[in-house]
Image (cartoon, rainbow, N blue to C red):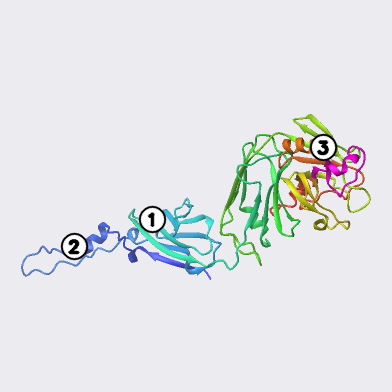
Amino acid sequence: MSRTRVLAHARVRAVVVTAATAALLAPLAACSSSGSPSAPDNKVKPSADDRPVTVTVSPSGERVPAGEPVKVTAAGGTLTSVTVTDTEGHRLTGKVAADGRSWVSDRKTVPGASYEVTAATRTAGAAAGTSKAAFSTAEAAKVNKVDWRPGAGATVGVAQPISLVFDHPVKNKAEVEKQLKITTSNDTEGSWGWMRDWSGLDRVDWRPRTYWKPGTKVTLKAELNGTDSGADGGWFVRDYTTTFTIGARQIVKVDLDSHQLALVRDGETVRRIPVSGGTPGGDKRSWRGTAVLMAKEGTINMNSETVGLADAYDKMVDYSMRLTWSGMYAHAAPWNARYFGNTNHSSGCIGMSDANAAWFYGQVRPGDPFEITGKDTKGVVAPGNGFGAWNVSWSEWQQKSALR
């Protein structure tokens, strides 16, 4: 349980000697004639203005719970400055209140840290002094971590969300969301939305109201250190930051009914490519809606057992571009050449010729939206199945924020 430490200047090294107290220390001189009665003993009492300032620091003690701001208050005077540092030299910043009576840190204390507090004060009579205190916080019994996208320095497409996936459950979603700060070079409007990732883990994404403007600079500062995830989640013990840039406006339009893919850049169609989508009428159908290119994975092994399909296939596939966690890709499919442009006959992916796949792979980047239409599909890509947030209306998306 957190305790409060009260410090008075009389107990610290910095001792303030005022004119009033100096008079008490000086020898008394009596000016009187022999045999006359003694002069009255008129002792000088300390002025209330020069009494020591009492400084209170909270929390106080050893191995106190983390996750609270440091609070410093002054009685009988004012605070002129407060410095709070840990043993690694990191400072907790804050501001002295307008009345000079209190100071509160901007950030919370973190687990497993030792802090030193130095408070500079001034008495009502303008005498300066200093008080010091120290306390430590308990270690985190469990630590929560974050996996985030996109990576620092990346250039991404106009549909790329900022996505954070947590190792452990996040019960205190509102408290965590408060620590997530997004800044953009053009004041882009957007919102956080919580969901269950395809992996089953808790996840929160930030997406703009509409696709990003090309050239936008985006910075995420996740000031999570010292934040408690809640029951079974553990503590965050570090901050996270990433900065990335939005590239050209590229939209991939896939019409499964006409079996055509079109790459549209800045409103102009660059190329049309005949494709074959998922076989209608069963589990091999493709997804529809907006799927965001998650990663360009090159040549990979594709195995039907990993996506729950009955008829087994196991092959190396070139120019693989991931669209969902559930296993939908765009890729080269030379074995399916006779179906390109006329029939959907795949296990759910969007296949094309080697030559077209090689060209297309070189043009697209992660974050480009694939706007997929078609009558016979599995349904719309869910927010947690890749980056499916664009399949939710803006008003619905805002409701997914824990701070709504």
Q: How far across and how far down the image is residue 67, in percent?
A: 56, 62
Return the residue nearer the eye: 313 or 379: 313
Up-down relation of residue 228 to residue 260 (above or below): below
Q: Magenta segment: does it hold 54? A: no
Q: Residues within 10 Å of mark 2 (few under 14, many from 20)?
A: few
Q: What amino acid is found at the position of numbered circle 3 in the picture?
A: Lys
Residue drawn where x is 76% and y is 40% of the image: 369
Q: Magenta segment: does it hold 336? A: yes
Residue under circle 1? 120
Return the residue nearer the eye: 105 or 115: 115
Q: Disc 2 versus disc 1: distance between alpha carbons?
A: 28 Å
Residue under circle 2? 26
Q: How far across and how far down the image is residue 41, in percent?
A: 19, 67
Magenta segment, which residues?
A: 330-352
Q: Disc 3 versus disc 2: distance between alpha carbons?
A: 93 Å
Q: Residues within 10 Å of mark 3 (few under 14, many from 20)?
A: some
Q: How far across and how far down the image is residue 380, in percent?
A: 84, 48
- Tell me the SS state at disc 3: strand
- Foreground disc of the pair 3, 1: 3
